[in-house]
Image (cartoon, rainbow, N blue to C red):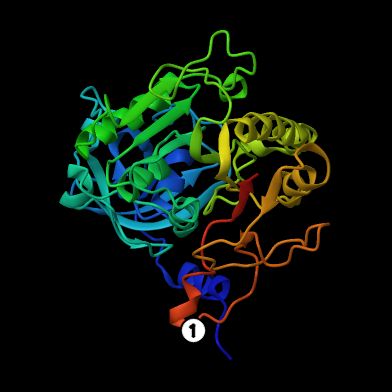
Amino acid sequence: MTPKPEDMDYVRFTSLPQTHPRLYVDSLCGVAVLRGSDIFAGGVIGIEPGASKDCPVSVYACLEKFNAGFTKAYTGATRFLGNGLLVMERKQLLGDIHANSGVAVRMTQPLVVCPSFQSCLFQSGNLVAQNLPSLVCARVLDAQPGQTVLDMCCAPGGKCLHLADLMQLQGTLIAIDKSAKRLNTVAEQAVKLVIDTENFLRIHCFDACRLCDDNGTDAGEPDSKPPYRPKQFDRVLLDAPCSALGQRPRLLTSSDSSSQLSKTASQLSSYAQIQNRLFREAIKLVKPGGFLVYSTCTTRPEENERQVSLALQINWPNLKLVEQTPNLRPFGINQPDGSVGLVQKFDPEVPYDASDVTNACNYDTIGFFVAKFVVA
């Protein structure tokens, strides 16, 4: 019998030694380590006595509130992340001389084996890391050189920059997000990739829920600032804000207490409401015959198949769900119009044969959903 991935993780967890002096990191750093990162100075919050430079350490993530430097004994829950080599002096991390940047621990025995993206290629900006479903999503949109393309919720910019590459930097690509801080990341990455941010890629801080001006009184063409008049874009990508329940790996922290989880559950409906508002704007902006791709990084049907059903049943009769290329995961709840296999749903909970190396990479992904529409 082929072992399941979770069984393999358990074997690795129980076989790795946890006898070195402990080094503690915050939960955000812990997630980064689970995704293949070394530990940077800013993530370290405590070290047990006995640890010094070039000493092996066992790394733990703190899952509850803590005092930096552990001025008081930490007794909260932790999660073992693996072992590494401390490459900074202790006093740089917790003493009078504080290190603000740089690698503090190089992970030599990570709990979860993921490739590190700290090579010179990634640091220079020549390569951009993306999850498989995100790559599929951009290709499904089928943006062509010379077209006018809109990315409605573009930050942090991975799909947007992929679209720029697929368009061969020809045409017009509009990148919208309401977070100026997150848009700075998009702009910085575009500069690294030598993308023209004046004539080709145009980045605007704007609320996508108000992106289409039906009256046209304050609206302009795609080469101007938003809002825009209806039917201006050949392709529209709506990678909508969502509950992000498909993201993995994740750490359950103290902020996810039972009361907080209950509160979160009561707020989940708000995502669907925002998605519906964005959907309405997106439809109006697509040219007749153009394509709209709707995507999320969650597995909740209320934010995925339900949104598709609403679009097909009630709101927009000029929409038609169409086939996707590439289509690696033709799953998802069937639609009321009889559509079968037209949406893609990447669900890490779906069992798969890990020995089938060719196909396993299509299953062992983050949770993600993609639907493609043509607008009449």
Total numbered labels:
1
Q: Quadrant of residue 208?
A: top right
Say above or below: 153 vs 302: above
The location of residue 261, given as percent across then percent down, is: 73, 38
Say above or below: 26 vs 118: above
Give me the residue at 51% from left, 32% from top.
Answer: 152
Q: Quadrant of residue 368?
A: bottom right
The residue lying toward the viewer, choosing from 226 and 320, is 320
Residue 253 appears anywhere in the view: yes
Question: What is the secondary structure assignment of the residue under circle 1?
Answer: loop
The residue lying toward the viewer, choosing from 74 and 155, is 155
Q: Residue furthest bottom?
A: 1
The residue lying toward the viewer, choosing from 63 and 235, is 235
The location of residue 95, given as percent across then percent down, is: 26, 27
Give me the residue at 55% from left, 20% from top.
Answer: 207
In the displayed structure, does residue 116 sit left or right of residue 347? left
Q: Residue furthest top?
A: 217
From the image, which quarter does the C terminus lie in? top right
The location of residue 323, given as percent across then percent down, is: 60, 62
Q: What kind of residue is marked 1?
A: Asp
From the image, which quarter does the N terminus lie in? bottom right
Give me the residue at 57% from left, 78% from top.
Answer: 4
Give me the residue at 22% from left, 43% from top.
Answer: 125
In the displayed structure, does residue 209 sit left or right of residue 79? right
The location of residue 214, given as percent across then percent down, is: 64, 18
Say above or below: 309 vs 101: below
Crowding at label 1, few (<14), some or many (≥20) Cα neighbours within 10 Å?
few
Residue 25 appears anywhere in the view: no
Residue that carries the numbered disc 1 in the rendered image: 356
